[in-house]
């Protein structure tokens, strides 16, 4: 059985950030982003990882970055280790498949969330006042219903804890109206193209979040795109509105954790092997359906 890579250590490089999933190294004029096999739920990193998860996320993102290139430029320089600087080459075994060399940008301080279906925090908000992030949706929606049109529902980026949903006016105050309009329109266009593509492959992308950065004054797409970590992926063949859905994302892990007597604060409980392997299988199936391959994983 493969073991999970919980963190990377490349002494020759400067580690600038170890996030919930990615280890980011500074290469001077670029960043090296390495996707580990760490997995988090409720903003808490689990003690065990999911083998190959980082590779799966990285490959899915590279696929979407390429597919969306005609809509928006992105930060990818290369996802092939042989293109990386010489200093990275001794670590090819670690980096292959789970890393990308990216341009440095100034990230915008909001998360760009798009919802095509009503679920999660959007469903909770709708139950309170029939609206999400200031957008009125009217009466009569059921949980997991498809919305008449996808909606842009931005949130803050919090260093710790949950991001906070905000309305478009607040997003405009934070990044300027022109920038807010630009990322809103880009987010909706990327989501609609991705959701249509995925649906043809048997996956409903219920909602997702994007991140954008500024490079020489231009907005470009960064971080990850339409992965099971940043999105809700539902199997089309079992979709039935009126309640929660089966998923290809880490909702399976969340559901398991909700069955425990755990207060969603560190330390997280240990994960049984069957939960780890079932989670891995869902991520791998999402990759196979979207990209048409599993790259030997």
Image (spheres, grey):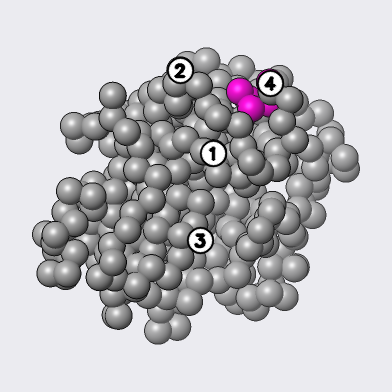
- Quarter the C terminus occupies: top left
Q: CA distance from mark 4 to mark 1?
A: 16 Å
- The quarter of the displayed image where residue 52 is located: top left
The residue that appears at 33% across and 48% down in the rendered structure is 58
Q: Which residues are magenta?
A: 255-259
Which residue has dot 4 on it? 259
- The quarter of the displayed image where residue 288 is located: top left
Q: CA distance from mark 3 to mark 1?
A: 24 Å
- Please tell me whether mark 3 sits on a helix, a strand or a loop: strand
Residue positioned most to the right: 129
Q: Earlier in the sequence, mark 1 or mark 2?
A: 1
State the image coordinates of residue 247 (x, y, percent, origin top left): 52, 25
- Please tell me whether mark 2 sits on a helix, a strand or a loop: helix
Q: Nearer the viewer, residue 161 or 120?
A: 161
Residue 257, magenta (yes or no): yes
Q: Earlier in the sequence, mark 3 or mark 1?
A: 1
Circles 4 and 1: CB atoms closer than 8 Å = no
Which residue has dot 2 on it? 274
Which residue has dot 3 on it? 211
Q: Nearer the viewer, residue 19 or 182?
A: 19
**Which is in the foreground here, disc 3 or disc 4?**
4
State the image coordinates of residue 134 (x, y, percent, origin top left): 79, 54
Q: Earlier in the sequence, mark 2 or mark 4?
A: 4
**Which is in the foreground here, disc 3 or disc 2?**
2
Which residue has dot 1 on it? 46
- Please tell me whether mark 4 sits on a helix, a strand or a loop: loop
**Which is in the foreground here, disc 3 or disc 1?**
1
Q: Going by the image, does 172 lie left or right of 111?
A: right
Q: Earlier in the sequence, mark 3 or mark 4?
A: 3
């Amino acid at each position: 059985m493969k073991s999970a890579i919980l963190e990377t250590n490349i002494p020759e490089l400067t580690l600038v950030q170890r996030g919930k999933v990615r280890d980011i190294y500074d290469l001077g004029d670029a960043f090296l982003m390495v996707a580990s096999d760490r997995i988090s739920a409720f903003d808490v990193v689990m003690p065990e990882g999911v083998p190959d998860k980082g590779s799966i996320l990285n490959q899915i993102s590279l696929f979407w970055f390429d597919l969306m290139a005609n809509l928006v430029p992105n930060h990818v320089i290369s996802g092939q280790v042989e293109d990386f600087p010489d200093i990275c080459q001794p670590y090819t075994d670690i980096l292959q498949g789970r890393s990308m060399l990216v341009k440095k940008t100034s990230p915008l301080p909001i998360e760009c969330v798009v919802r095509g279906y009503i679920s999660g925090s959007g469903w909770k908000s709708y139950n309170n006042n029939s609206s999400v992030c200031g957008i009125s949706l009217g009466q009569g929606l059921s949980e997991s219903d498809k919305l008449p049109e996808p909606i842009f529902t931005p949130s803050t980026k919090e260093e710790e804890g949950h991001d906070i949903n905000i309305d478009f006016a607040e997003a405009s105050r934070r990044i300027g109206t022109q920038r807010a309009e630009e990322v809103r329109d880009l987010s909706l266009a990327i989501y609609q193209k991705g959701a249509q593509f995925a649906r043809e492959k048997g996956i409903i992308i219920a909602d997702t979040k994007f991140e954008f950065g500024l490079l020489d004054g231009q907005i470009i797409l960064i971080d990850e795109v339409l992965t099971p970590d940043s999105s809700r992926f539902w199997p089309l063949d079992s979709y039935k509105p009126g309640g929660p859905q089966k998923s290809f994302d880490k909702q399976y892990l969340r559901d398991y954790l909700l069955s425990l007597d755990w207060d969603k604060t560190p330390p997280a409980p240990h994960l049984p092997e069957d939960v780890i392997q079932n989670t891995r299988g869902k991520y791998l199936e999402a990759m196979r359906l979207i990209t048409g391959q599993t790259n030997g994983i």
